[in-house]
Image (cartoon, rainbow, N blue to C red):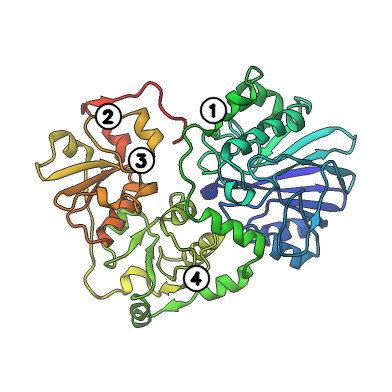
Amino acid sequence: MKIEQIYTGCLAQGAYYVTSGSEAIIIDPLREITPYMSRAEADGVTIKYILETHFHADFVSGHLDLAKATGAPIVFGPMADPQFAFHSAKDGEVLPFGDCSVRVLHTPGHTMESTCYLLIDENGSEHALFSGDTLFIGDVGRPDLAQKSAAMTQEELAGLLYDSLRSKIMTLPDSVTVYPAHGAGSACGKNMSKETFDTLGNQKMVNYALRSDMDRSDFIKELTNGLLPPPSYFGMNVAMNKKGYDSIQVVMARGLKALSRDQFTSLMPEALILDTRPATEFAQGFISGSIFIGLEGQFAPWVGALIPDIKQEIILVTPDGKEEETVRRLARVGYDNVRGYLDGGIHAWNDALDSIGRVEASEVEQGLTANELLIDVRKPGEYESEHLADVPSIPLDFINERMAEFPKDKELVLLCGGGYRSMIAASILKARGFEGIKDVIGGYAALAKTNLPKVTVACASTQS
């Protein structure tokens, strides 16, 4: 038996490839299926099942393309209702593969169809739990994402999650290894660990949601406290995962079109210009109206959070040789309408370029002018933990909804944790007509080393 966690950092997502004998199962696959196919071919195994823990909201799963390529059935747990052929597994059903098997554990709460898969090894021992978004390392799934589809409140869903955890998961042996669908950085939970797996026994000791002294009402209150609104693309990804989508090959062929300068220009009136170069390069020169979201950060989640329409036409300016990677990472979160990329990159643009000013932390410490306003665009939890005195917070996550709070009669100086998010915010404001925008090089990490007065909130939110 072999368990391989295939972790994608920019999505904080874990897919799983498990083999036993001559057969394999894939759990929560990403949209590009080549890695799974290549592993199976190299190992000489047949993919027997494609297991989905639930309808994912933060990425487009690869279940449909993988099923077409392998003939393996797509498996969902009870209460799933996709619009394609699948196997509806019953609670407690056992799915054999090789010398092992998987037991289906229906664990509603995060969503109504949420299901965990318990791996039974060759000796009949309960070995590992693929817990999806039901149980994370250090956290559990948020209960507010499925409210509308379930016709339930987040409190009711949280109550179901409490029951699922205590009746289906916490009764398992402490030696069971927990393999979740996400880690730190995902918006599917509040306070996930950077670790991507752990024993159930250790989680019982360190995970706040598994405390033995926590009753149902305490759990509901703690789980629903401090939840931020989910990214707008979540609902659209759920719909794609339930209804179907274009194959990744079609999406890649459509997006990987080298556009001449004239072709690029002709698309600009309708398309959004997305620039994925490093922040330092973008600041020095970009096509007016471009939005910066660099590949070096949490690219796909920020695209989903900040580009409201998943069907938006997009044209790209990318680092040299990164065109294919950019289109693929956009497709992971359902942004399939890329029309192409500027052939030759920014160097092919002969017209004047726009730019964004940058300031060092030492310049901020020496004092801004009376017409400059410093704004913190970090997440609420980061700001509450510590921030500069008298510096307002307008999180990047909500910049589209809170645009009116940015004064146009001031020169805005933006800061985030390290400079990536502040450059995104600066590009959005610039595209909306704001002038004199700057960002702080190194962000709060640099400012924290200065003597500027700081405010610490003792009971900061766990959501960051």
Q: Position of residue 101 (x, y in %)?
A: 86, 44
Mark 2 vs mark 3: in front? 3
Which label belongs to residue 378?
3
Q: Helix, strand, or loop for circle 2? A: loop
Q: Quadrant of residue 307?
A: bottom left
Q: Is residue 236 above or below residue 208?
A: below
Percent coordinates x, y for residue 5 in the rendering = 67, 45
- Give the residue displayed 44% in from the left and 71% down from the top: 313
Q: Residue at x 87, y 53 (%)?
A: 22
Question: Which is nearer the N-term, disc 1 or disc 4?
Answer: 1
Q: Earlier in the sequence, mark 4 or mark 2?
A: 4
- Quick one: quadrant of the N terminus? top right
Q: Is disc 2 in contact with disc 3, using a CB cutoff of under 8 Å?
A: no
Q: Nearer the viewer, residue 362 or 181?
A: 181
Foreground tag (1 vs 3): 1
Rounded to the nearest angstrom, the CA distance separating label 2 from label 1 is: 34 Å
- Residue 449 is marked as 2
| Quarter of the rendering occupied by the C terminus | top left
Label 4 neighbourhood size at 10 Å, few (<14), some (14-19), many (20+)?
many
Q: Which residue is mark 4?
A: 337
Instruction: Select label 4 or label 2 by which is in front.
Output: 4
Residue that lies at the very extreme toward the top in this rendered image: 213
User: From the viewer's perspective, is residue 451 above or below residue 56?
Assistant: above
Q: Is residue 261 above or below residue 46?
A: below
Q: Quadrant of residue 81?
A: bottom right
Which three-letter amino acid code belongs to the residue tagged 3? Arg
Q: CA distance from mark 1 to mark 4?
A: 40 Å
Q: How many angstroms separate mark 2 from mark 3 (CA)?
A: 17 Å
Residue for badge 1: 222
Is disc 4 in contact with disc 3, using a CB cutoff of under 8 Å?
no
Residue 207 seen:
no
